[in-house]
Each structure stands twice: as C-alpha cells, then as structure tokens.
Image (spheres, rainbow, N blue to C red):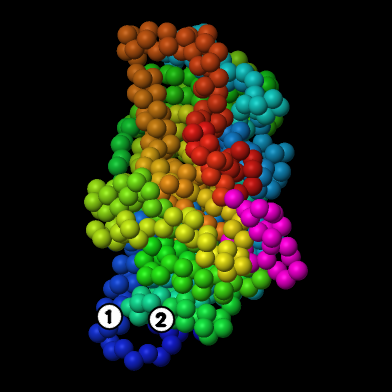
Amino acid sequence: MPDRAKSSAAKSDIVIAGAGYVGLTVAVAIAEAAPGLSVRVVDAAPEGVWTKDERASALSAAAVRMLSRLGVWQEVESESQPITEMIVTDSRTSDPVRPVFLTFAGDARPGEPFAHMAPNTALIRALRKRAEALGVAIDMGTPVSGISLEEPAATVSLADGRTIEARLLVACDGRKSKLREWAGIGTVSWDYGQSGIVATVRHERPHNGLAQEHFLPSGPFAVLPLPDNRASLVWTEPTRAAERLMAADDLIFEAELEQRFGHKLGPLRLEGGRRAYPLNLIIARDFVRPRLALAGDAAHGIHPIAGQGLNLGLKDAAALAETVVEAARLGLDIGALDVLERYQRWRRFDTLSMGATTDVLNRLFSNDNALLRTVRDFGLSLVDRAPPLKSYFIDQAAGFGRGARPRLLEGEAI
Amino acid sequence: MTEAKPSTIDANEIDRFSRLAREWWNPAGKFKPLHKFNPVRLDYIREQVCMNFGLDLKDLKPFEGLRILDIGCGGGLICEPMARLGASVVGADASETNIEVAKIHAAQSDLAIDYRATTSEDLERAGETFDVVLALEIVEHVSDVDLFLSSCAKMVKPGGLLFVATINRTLKAGAMAIFGAEYVLRWLPRGTHQYSKLVRPQEIEAPVLAAGLDVIDETGVVYNPLSDSFRRSSDIDVNYMILSRRPREGEMSEAAASKPPRKRRTPARRKAPKAG
C-alpha cells in the first residue's frame, strides 16, 4: 500500500460528485471556511444543461441565511419572490369555494420572510460563480466511472480516463446515486403511486406573495408565487392520472389546471413545459462509509408535500461542511469513519423525522374519506386557533425546527 | 520525506506491522476509546498552543514553525494531527513495534514525522528541546513518574508548553476508568491500568514545578454516554489534563511572582461541576 501514495494519480482533499445545489453548497461552504483544503466537483451532465432547468425551489429562511453568509444569496435575491403568507385548504376539486382552514402570515424573524421562491438556474449560477471565485475546480461532462474506498484514500475513476485520489469523497449524485450503489449502501424506499407535475403559469392578477396548498383528494396541489404575476405549481396526482395529463394537449391540460387553480388570480396561461416526477420516499441505510459521505437526494428523497427536500439537502451541506472543517482544524483525517459518523448522527434523526412527517401528512390528506376529512379539518382549525402550534409550524417551514443546527443555518460562519 | 527510514526488519514483520497499523487506526477497533478521546484532547491542545504562541485558531496549519514532541506516541494518533496542523513532529515510544506501526501509517497518510524508539530520558540527555511536549496517557505507565516528568519538563524551550494527560487516583477513577472501562464496557483490555499506578495532580505538579515550569491550567475530561463522546469539564476526578509553561528569560515566573507559592485551585474546582 505505501506505493499507492507515490502513484501518479491527481490528488484533491475533497472530491464531490454532483454539481447540483447540494454539491455546490458543500464545495462553497468548505472552500470558504477552510481555504487550505482543495475541493473538486465533477458532474456527468454536459456544461450548460443546468441552464435549461425551468423549475423554481422554495428556500426556507434558514437556507437563505446560510446562502447569505456564503455570499450566494446576494446574487439570487433580485430574481426571487418572498413568500409572505401561506394558506392551506382541504377541499374537493369541484368545490366552488374552498374554505381556508389555516393561514400563516408574517415573518420567521422580523423582516425575514419564512421562505423565498428562487429559480433553480439563478441558484446554481450564483453557487457556481462563488465556487469558482473560491478556487473550486468544476468539471462538467465528466461522469464517474468507478470508485474504490480502499485505504488510505478514496480513488475516483473518471470516464475520461483520469484518476483522482481524495481524502473524502462526497456523493451528491441524486436519488439514483451510483456512488451509493458502488459503496454497497442499501436503501429503504416506499412508492406513493403518485406523481408530481411541475409547471409554471402566468396569471392576470398579483399574488401578493401568497402561497397556497390545497389538499385535494387526488393529492396536494401547491401554488407558489414567483416574481411578476407568475406561479410555480406542484400538482400531485395518482401516477396513471398524471400520465394522462402529461399526454394531453395544452387545451385539456389547462382546463384541468384551471379547475384546480381556481379563478382568484384571473385567467391563466402555461409558461414553458410541464414535467412529471414519480414520488417516492427513499432513505439510505447509512449516510457514510470510511472516506465517503452521502448528502442531499443521494442520502434521502422525501415526499415534496411540505417543500422540504431542497432544504433538507442544504442542511446536509451545512452539517457536512461544519463537520469536515472542524475535523481539519483539529488535524484529524477528514475522511475517517469516526469523523464522518458525527455528520451521520447529526443528520439522520432530522431526515427520518421529516420523512415520517411528510409521509403522514400525505396519507392523511390524499383521500376523500369523510371521517378523516372531519378529523383533519378539526385539527387544522385547532392549529389555526392556537398561536404556539402555529408558530411551531412556521418555525418548521422556515427551517428553524428543534435540535442543534449547523452554524451556517443560523447565519454564522463555520 | 515520507519514506520510513531503512530498518533491518524482514517482510513478515512488515506484514505484521501493517496489520497492527490497521488495528491502531480503526476507529471501531481495539483502540476505539483513544479515537473517541482524541477530538477533546486535540481541541484543548490546539486552543492552548494557539493562545500561548498567538496563532490563528481557524487556520488549518497554525503550528507551522513549532517543534513538537509526543512522548509515548503509540501508533501516532496524536502525531499525525500535529503534523497536519503544520508542526515539525518527533514521535517517541519505548516500543519498537509501535514505532514501526506509526511509520507505516504516516507514509500512507503522506505525512513526514520523525518517529524514534526511545525514551524521554534519552532524548533529554541528547539535548533535544521542543516548543511543545505532549505526555498523554503515559505517566500512569512509567516506572518513575518524577524522573519521567522532570526529563519532559527539561526539554521544554522557554515560552514553551508541557501537556500531561492522565487518570486521577480517586475511588471514582478506579470505578469508572478501571472497573467501568476494562470490566464492564470492555473498552480496554483488563490490566491496562492498575489503581496504584494512577497519578494525582499534585504528583504531576511537584516535579514539573521543580524543573522550573509554571502550572498554568488544568481541566477535567468527562464521558457523556448520550452523545457517546468526551467533553471538557471542571471535574478532574477521573480523566484530567495539566498544562504547564516554561517562562521566558526575564519573564517573571508565576511561582516567583506570587508569594506565598501558588496554591492548588481546589475550592474553585469543587464548586463548578454542580452547575453543569
């Protein structure tokens, strides 16, 4: 083994597979706090593919604090839409008027909206700019073709024939993570039999920063405000129905959409394409191996009902970066299992509880059972009338739930 | 730089050492307690060294330019972090096997560390001096505590630091560190520690003060079973660390400055644990 150290492979302290928001945030957070560590990001997608993403994402107040601290949010803010109010309804699709059971208004902290909607391209562009300014190397169009976690280093083979040795390899390569599979880490998964349709609409009247979540019998239907008179939709249907909707022509799709969207915001027009994503819950049995850490969707994919998938991923990034930087400042080996286990302990509980909560919410609401409807409406109206419960939910939505939070999510430096 | 020095041991021996190196460095293996103990010790060392020499705590290589001795270095669990932090490190251990094991692992980690199978007395006799001397979990294993500590203290350069970490000779330590760790949790092989060889703080301070150092800090280390980790505490009944410093020339020694000679801070220590 000693001859391995003298081999000709390129070296990097940290290699991150996946240049999505989680991978880039890990890179930026580490490079900013510990400029002495070399960080390289590789991604299979050819350069420029990310600019075609038409989706927008909800960012909790905690995530916004972190991105501000990292010098990223400043670039995204002008393109984002603050969410200042949120209503929740429980109704049948055909109900002409949907009684509002729950309204959340106000800020996470004074002057700080509890969430923002930001276009994915703006977020990725700002993260890449910051990463490059901090000296992070980003190789697009560079798939990983294999890994070895044999001590003393992780060895990453790239499809272009290069080999990189790293003290720590971070897998941010999504739900179907190849790195997770190669490391032999199993997953626990559950298929909801539902698909989420994502689309953007332009409407006539202003939304005033109002987000809406309608619990329809077929599944939740969320309307999230975007800059100008536009909104991002997350429309959940049983997979069969979603397939039919995806195959339908624009006229039929828009008619179905209008029936769910309502007429409060005036006439609608679809902007750009529509895409459907099968919904499943998937959680990795382990988040770490010696020299390997999973983060973001590679570690867990949850039901998007509460809009927390991206925020969980950013929490992973904050916790992993803090763990790695603190270990490096103590002179510890950043890829050693005992170091990485601190990250795993930190993130697993939160992930499991968020996964379970969103799962229960979905099961509770995605049906038309009269008894359940009465029970859940009673519950929602209770929440609406009890300020402590309500502020608990606002805190959850804003990303300020209980438990020791990574410093970046408090807006502090590592 | 990272190559092990030429030695006379054969290939079978190297295999054995490589196996032992994996064992030493496996955080879930035989040396698990030392791995769990490491972050709290390293954090204390880093903080105190940075404070003493005016270094930046957030720097990844704050110890550049410092010469550090780790006496009783074992497989190098402390030497490697010290080298990563930028120090020029001498690791000494009386066991040839430990030294060979440590050399193999340092080469794998790409670190240059000067490992020597020797004793503190021999190093001191050879006129070696250091900015920082670390004697961690070792005094309870030496045959002559006074002789050992005074040789360690003499190697500390003016303005430099000596860290001593060990287990107190109290009933609580006997119950927790010996009965608990060796018999109940089986963290350590039975017989690792003998009660009579445990060392009280006073027994460390006497030879250190006699060698001209000032005792500048002491801290306890306690185990938290909920988080399965160690943290610093004012409770020094079981694990504790004592930090002393050799005054620079012309600098008033703490002992000389305060008459009568500095008293142990026993009362303050007694009050604090209740608060936590």
Q: Is residue B257 magenta?
A: yes
For badge 2, the amino acid type reads: Ala
Q: Which residues are magenta?
A: B244-263
Circle 1 packing at 10 Å, graded few (<14), some (14-19), many (20+), is few
Q: Which residue is mark 2?
A: B117
* Label 1 element class: helix
Residue occupying image coordinates x 55% and y 31%: A400
Q: Is residue A379 visible?
A: yes
Distance of mark 1 from mark 2, alpha carbons? 19 Å
Q: Are marks 1 and 2 on the same chain?
A: yes
Disc 2 crowd rating (10 Å Cα; few below 14, some 14-19, many 20+) is some
Q: Main secondary structure of the magenta part?
A: loop
Residue at the spot of label 1: B15
Note whether A139 is above or below A86 in the view shown.
Answer: below
The image position of residue B221, as x and y in percent, is 46, 49
Chain holding disc 2: B
Left or right for A326, reference B200 = right
- Does label 1 or label 2 sit earlier along the sequence? 1
Q: Is residue A65 above or below residue B145?
A: above
